[in-house]
Amino acid sequence: MRKARILIADDHELFRRAIAIMLSQEPDMEVIGQAGDGLEALEIAQELHPDLVLMDINMPVCDGIEATRLLHKLLPDVIILMLTVHKNDQKLIECLQAGASGYCLKETTSVGFIRGLRGALKGEATLPRELLPRLVAEYSRLANLPEVLPNQVVQPVLTTRELKILELAENGATNKEIAAQLSISVYTVKSHIRSILEKLGVKNRWEAVSIARKLDLLRPKR
């Protein structure tokens, strides 16, 4: 029987090792690599092409959501299961939009965790039961939004982090200064800016700020 090849991405080495030891006891799974940040996870995934990546959300250099977005584009057949300690509705939506197949809370039991992994490997959506009602409510809300006609302009949706980065850019902050203020890496800032430019259909941050102002996406200046 072929074992499922798993990559663990988490910035806490002790947690990674504990997960690796637990999975080594499963006859149908093997850990083929470990990464301490999102960028390293991308590099290892491209080299080893795992079946499933366990991706922590909060990591240095490149956070888990951005790493998931990039990995899903590069290797769309790789299953990505997010790991987090937070029961955050918005994070859950962002993870699924980025391409994750599921969302696993670190507080879950070992039995529930393994069950979630096997479910994800079978193509099932792995989601905490307590978050399902909120997820269903959010998708119901989106489904009930007015239908956009062909001649109507679709308002681009920027995340809270992307809007904050645009506000800082508007004030003249460099990528390095934005990274310092938001406690993220310059690499992550650049990734967010690329996403902003794609969503707004512009070539640079100044055009992005101008369009965002026209669409009332940014808070009024004081």
Image: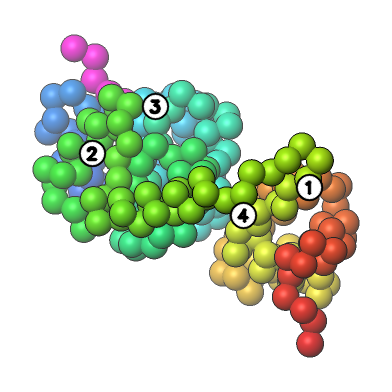
Residue to which mark 1 is pinned: 153
The residue lying toward the viewer, choosing from 214 and 194, is 214
In primary-sequence order, the first of circles 1 and 3 is 3
Q: Earlier in the sequence, mark 2 or mark 4?
A: 2
Which residue carries the number 3 mark?
50
| Amino acid type at mark 3 | Pro
Q: Residue at x 32, y 36 (%)?
A: 125
The label nearer to you, 1 versus 3, is 1
Q: Which mark is residue 213?
A: none
Q: Where is the C terminus found, in terms of image quarters?
A: bottom right
- Tag 2–tag 4 contact (CB < 8 Å): no
Tell me which label, 2 or 1, sits earlier in the chain.
Answer: 2
**Labels 3 & 2 near each other (Cβ < 8 A):** no
**Residue at numbered disc 2:** 116
Q: Is residue 102 above or below residue 28?
A: below
Residue 182, placed above or below residue 96? below
**Considering the numbered disc 1 on the image, is that residue within a helix, a strand or a loop?**
loop
Residue name at image x 79 percent, y 62 percent: 215
The amino acid type found where label 4 is placed reads Thr
Give the percent coordinates (x, y) of residue 29: 22, 27
* Range of magenta residues: 1-8
Seen in the image, is 154 located left or right of residue 106?
A: right
Between the residue at mark 4 and the residue at mark 1, the CA separation in whole angstroms equals 29 Å
